[in-house]
Amino acid sequence: MRDIEPGGDRDKLEEVDEWQLYASAGYASSELESEEIESEEGNSEEIWFDGDDLEFEGSTVNWDSPPCPAPLGIAHVIKIGVCDHCLARVSGFHSKGSGPDSGSLIREEAFLRDADLESKIVQDYCPLCENLFDDVENIVDRVFETLSKTEFSTMQFGIHLPKDLVQEEDRIRSKYGAPGSYHLKGAIVESIHERIRGLGKEVDFVKEKPDVMVLVDGLTLRVDVDVRPIFLYGRYRKLSRGIPQTRWPCRACRGRAQGCESCDETGLQYVDSVQDLIGEPIRDALDAEDTSFHGMGREDIDVRCLGSGRPFVLEVKKPSKRTLPVEDLVELVKGHAPGKVEVDRFTWCTRKKVNEVKQSRSEKTYTIRFRPEGPVDKETAEKSILSLDGQVIDQETPQRVSHRRAAKTRRRKITSIDKLSFEDDEIEITLRCEAGTYVKELVHSDEGRTTPSVQSVLGTDCEVIWLDVLEIHYE
């Protein structure tokens, strides 16, 4: 009864993924940088120069041209070597569609207007994308090779491009592209989407809550895949004492396991936990990496949780499978933890449910058995204990949890005392309390830190024998 489960960072929710800074699933924005044109006065003539003249293979490109979709603007971006993909997105001819086919059509029409235009192209690689569109097929192959053993139906892409490429592309496109021309990030991601659709893959591209998120490095073509967790909501009953709610690292090796005789190299103080009795068969069935357990509070290791059970959310990390029927998962838990933990049903949920469960302030009904020190008059004892019905008590942070709880005084209400019985020298009480009430301390007073208490109204020391959670009044 002395063991208290350790707290820790496991209860903290995950932060927003950093890769989303690079997300560009057709809705990203890019900054357009304005250019200032400076002029200098000469003695005989005005010289125009803004530092933007580029020299490609010995030929200086004239930057003083109108933007697309003017024919001269189209001719200009063709001269500097843009690829068909980029020509389509900066030209402004939306009626011709997008992609290399429409770019090729725009290029052919420009060549018909100027027979010498093709011979004036001065660059072999595209200054807007550095021919990154040519690598789309390679990127898609890498993505599906990485995800070959992962089940998913929704996807979101992010792409990280070199800063200098983004700045140069913005500069050229904002100056010579048509108004509203598509930025590079969005165009590449859309091209990846089109390639995947062309392969007949049954994938939906979404902006929120995808099954998998993919981050592509535009410089190295490295593909990083993040398989998003899935969440299951349920209520568990803990039928046996001596089982912590979450994994409890070995005190001797601090969870390192290797070479530790104290825990037989398991890294755990207790082999069983509610988290693993429920989570391990599910993790194995979904071929996942690990689980996290988010409970609506927690009972002590020596306390049973009965009734309809304690609400919880199981977070399954990086699952390879996502579509097993929840009824099958319930049966797996029943077969893995008979006589220890029970779950009647699961429902799929989202991370939002974690916050809801963790922040709930539900009242609870307990049964506690204790032994007064020395004989007590039953009639007097019953009257004294029932006097606590409806009272508000003050509880300082108990000594047993002072290492993980802030030192303060909490006011809690004893909603009702529903049942009181005597058996030999022991007393059993069933009572309903406000969330956050320390029920053991309500009985033995924790050396006067809880007032009033059963011990104070009886006028004798009380020893707690056991405690059960009978009901958590949620939903």
Image: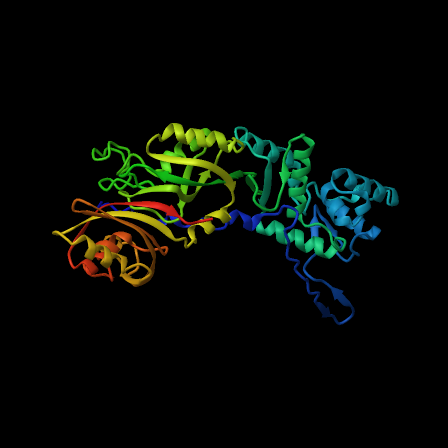
Residue sitting at 28 percent across and 43 percent down? 301
Left or right, 428 with reference to 171: left
Q: Who is closer to the viewer here, 185 or 18?
A: 18
Residue sitting at 37 percent across and 55 percent down? 435
Residue 213: x and y in percent read: 55, 41
Left or right, 31 with reference to 224: right
Query: Residue 125 lies in what quarter of the image?
Result: top right
As drawn, 193 above or below 459: above
Q: How is the image coloured?
A: rainbow
Q: Quadrant of the N terminus?
A: top left
Query: Residue 144 lies in what quarter of the image?
Result: top right
Q: Who is closer to the viewer here, 262 or 129?
A: 262
Q: Who is closer to the viewer here, 44 or 321?
A: 321
Residue 445: x and y in percent read: 22, 57
Residue 450: x and y in percent read: 24, 60
As drawn, 151 above or below 206: above
Residue sitting at 21 percent across and 60 percent down? 457
Residue sitting at 37 percent across and 39 percent down? 237
Q: Who is closer to the viewer here, 321 or 220?
A: 321
Query: Residue 104 lies in what quarter of the image?
Result: top right
**Can residue 17 be seen by looking at this rendering?**
no
As drawn, 407 above or below 355: below
**Can residue 392 be seen by looking at this rendering?**
yes
Residue 21: x and y in percent read: 55, 51
